[in-house]
Image: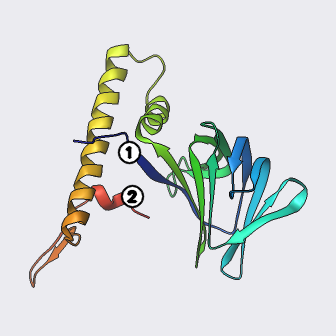
Amino acid sequence: MISSEPNIKVGVLEKYSEVSGELLEQFKLTDDVIVTGRFKAVIKNGEIILYGGKEIELIRGKEITLKPLNGGSFTLHDVIFGINFHWERKEHQTFQGSLRLLARENGITAINEVSVEKYLASVISSEMSATAPMALLKAHAITSRSWLVAMLEMKKKFSNLGIPSQRTQQSDTELVRYYDREDHDI
């Protein structure tokens, strides 16, 4: 069982040449730099360049982390939902927690680092109807939390043991592939 509330990393965007949004509270960029307001990140020559309002360059690097000072939130513009489904669309989405931007060879990857409880609150409110019975909402919250914590514990257990992934097993006559915990690894 977990001894303290873990943070999780949730991939929000990947393969973007430009990421824009707004820091709705104060975020720590470096020990000396606190930022807020609109931002834009672009990838150039394998690194991310982060600009503040009025196109002022704030920092550049292969990885940039913005940490909220007081539990702040941020909005990312043009987040794609339902990729390759008939209901695919772009939306501005607001997240709590830290924002990590990673330079990858195919573009920028944005990751939201957030506590399990804050993540579950946002997921449950987005997956369930506000008119659903309270008992159903509570059951969904308990099930979601139990599944997520079990997956985190399993990942920790296997990484501590040094056991490689067992998601694919292949012989001369068959291929078995398991889908679950690693489906969302970035």
Q: Quadrant of residue 165?
A: bottom left
Q: Position of residue 21 (x, y in %)?
A: 73, 50
Labels 1 and 2: the sequence-earlier one: 1
Image color mode: rainbow
Query: Of the residues shown, which amino acid type is indicated by label 2?
Result: His
Which structural element holds mark 1?
loop
Front residue of 15/36: it is 36
Up-down relation of residue 29 to residue 127 (above or below): below
Which residue reaches farthest front? 32
Q: Residue at x 27, y 42 (%)?
A: 2
**What residue did someone put label 2 on?**
184
Q: Quadrant of residue 26?
A: top right
Up-down relation of residue 122 to residue 167 (above or below): above
Residue neighbourhood size for the residue with mark 1, other residues' Cα within 10 Å, grouped as few (<14), some (14–19), many (≥20): few
Q: Residue at x 48, y 20 (%)?
A: 130
Q: Position of residue 168 (x, y in %)?
A: 20, 72
Front residue of 147/152: it is 152
Residue 63's tag is none
Quadrant of the rendering where the N terminus is positioned = top left
Q: Position of residue 39 (x, y in %)?
A: 77, 54
Query: Of the residues shown, which amino acid type is indicated by label 1?
Result: Pro
Residue neighbourhood size for the residue with mark 2, other residues' Cα within 10 Å, grouped as few (<14), some (14–19), many (≥20): few
**What residue did someone put label 1 on?**
6
Question: How many numbered discs?
Answer: 2
Please tell me whether mark 1 or mark 2 is closer to you in this view: 1
Q: Residue at x 74, y 56 (%)?
A: 32
Q: Residue at x 37, y 14 (%)?
A: 134
Up-down relation of residue 109 to residue 9 (above or below): below
Which residue reaches farthest right? 54
Which residue reaches farthest bottom? 172
